Each structure stands twice: as C-alpha cells, then as structure tokens.
Image (cartoon, rainbow, N blue to C red):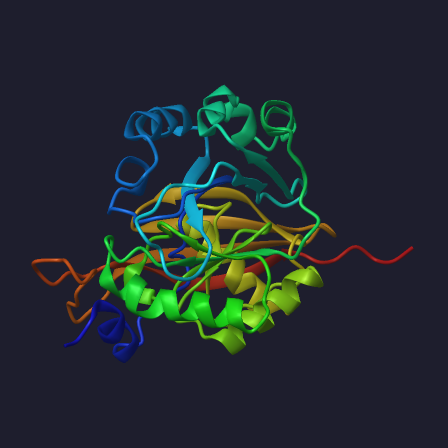
Amino acid sequence: MSTCATASRALDEPMSGTAATATTWLLLEQPGPWGAEALTSSHLDPALGRALERAAQGTGVRIALIRRPGRHADCRMRSVRHVYAAHTVPGGVWLHSATTTDPERLLGLDFTALGQGDHRTFDAVLGGRPHTGRPLTLVCTNGKRDRCCALLGRPLATELAASGVTGVWEVTHLGGHRFSPTLLVLPYGYAYGRADAHAVKDVLHGVQDGRVVVEGCRGRSSWERPGQAAELAVRTAAGEYRADALSVVRTAGSAPRWEVTVAHADGRRWHVLVAQGASVPPRPESCGAAVLGAPARMDVVAVRQLTAAPLAS
C-alpha cells in the first residue's frame, strides 16, 4: 500500500522551508506508548501536558517527548528522566541537559526567557548544565501521528543506535510526515527528511565541526519557513556551510510572497525573494488524510547579494 512518504518521494517534492519552527526546544524523556497528541496522550500526566502546552504557547519554545530507541512496552516509568533544552538562534546557540524525578518541575521554568535564549531558568529550576556529549539526533517515530514515522523512523533510530551513534532519541513530532524518516539535530536546530543512516552520520560529523550539510535539509527551526528556504539558498549560492555564519535578519511580506534579508557574520547581506506555491499534482499530506492535498512549498525565486565582504585589514 502506498504511503504519504512514498508519494512525496516519487513526486520529488522539495523539502526546503518545511521544518518546524522553534527558537528553543524543550525535551522530556517519556518512555512507553505515545498517542497522536503525545503531551496529553502518553504516560505523562495529561493535566501536566496541558499545563506545559499553555506555558509554552507564544514563547518560541517547542516541547516534545523523547525516548530511547527500541521496544516500548507499556511499563512503569523509571524514576529519573532526562531533560534537554536547546536554543538554536545563531550567536546564542546552546544545549543544556538535566535529570529530574518530578516532571512537574518544568512548570517552574520561565518559558518566555527560555524562548529568548536565557538558559539560567533551566539551570536554576532543574540543575541544568551544558551538555558535554555528542549532538542530539531526534528521529520522529510516532506512528499514532502518521504510520510513516513508525515504519521508516523507528528502523532508522534503531540502526543509528545499534551502529554506535550516541545521542540518538526517538521524538514525538517534528512535522512533515510525508518526508519520513525525519530528524532534528541539536544544538543548531536543522531538520532533515528522507534520511538514511549514512546521511545522518555525515550530518553529525558536520555538526561536530560546526558545519551544515544542506543535502536533505528542511531548514533551521530558528526561522519561519520563508527564512528557512532563503537561508539554505544563500548557503548554496555562497558556498557557506559554517552553522552560525548566516542569520535571517528581516522578513517582509506575507503569503504568497516574501522578501528575506540574510546576513553573514562578516557583514555581507543577501536579498532573497521567496514565493509560496502549491504542490501539484495533489498527494496525501499524511497517511491518515481523507482527501488528497496540495501542500504549500517555499520556492526561492531570486538570490541577490547586496554587500560585499569587507576587505581584510
């Protein structure tokens, strides 16, 4: 039976500008089964899940549940949970980790400050510290959201973990089921689709060197979708792959047309014209969709460099 991911791949649907948006990611370990809305349909107290959703709303913080790759029996949660927070905006990137036996402590976080890149609230409330391990690789495996995530994401997460890649977690939802298997790499917040284990390892080698692999990249979660597409286009045009070298500093306009300004740390700037189009022919946007759809796509129409790099002194 055809799946939404099979149809998307067959139609060569572009992935640029399709990543979930968040300036800061907050991840809570929650083994066991997940429902479609995992914060309120898992072994996590649903009242706590609803309270966390309300606390994060409008702050730039995106909350997700994570669990180790493997079988997920419907068993009792062990007492100590891992918690991570990652801020993804260039110039202020960080990844901190903590453990807790009481997930309700997350309600003590200042979510507005966290979304703005202030890690002190995470450190004070949860005893957080800078993460010293390898980058985090979050593979979407929530089959209750879309069966492609389980059919394609779970084997990828298992293969990565079995091959010795550390920092691999299954995650509840990254959006874009039809690009499964999908993953997010922290701390920089770049999302990828249609991934295989070899490609993921290349991405992780790049992250460790502070570089971005653009092949298969959906965008950086720091930016809204027109900015994601614009930044990737500038990276390709300028041959610039250092993770924090580029920032989206201005986005003007509204659907279906935006003018995006991308700035380099050395002072260069680019003007990027991005247009929203509809994917044709119609295709399933998810495996559970009752009708075919025409998902929006971000098309980069033009990239123009505005300023040259400053002369070396």
Q: Residue furthest left?
A: 290
Front-most of residues 138 and 271: 138
Q: Quadrant of residue 141?
A: bottom left
Residue 86 quadrant: top right
- Looking at the image, can residue 240 be seen? no
Query: Where is residue 187 shown, x and y percent of the image?
Result: 60, 49
Which of the 4 image quarters holds residue 268? bottom right
Any part of residue 10 in sight = yes
Q: Is residue 73 left or right of residue 115?
A: left
The picture places residue 181, in percent across and down from the top left corner, at: 37, 67
Q: How many marks?
A: 0
Task: State the quadrant of the C terminus.
Answer: bottom right
Instruction: Report x, y in % for residue 169.
Output: 48, 55
In front: 107, or 258? 107
- Residue at horizontal 41 percent and vertical 29 percent from the top: 56
Asked if 5 appears above or below 108 in the picture, the reply is below
Q: Position of residue 77 (x, y in %)?
A: 41, 41
At a point 59% along the width and 23% down the height, the residue shown is: 125
Above or below residue 133? Residue 60 is: above
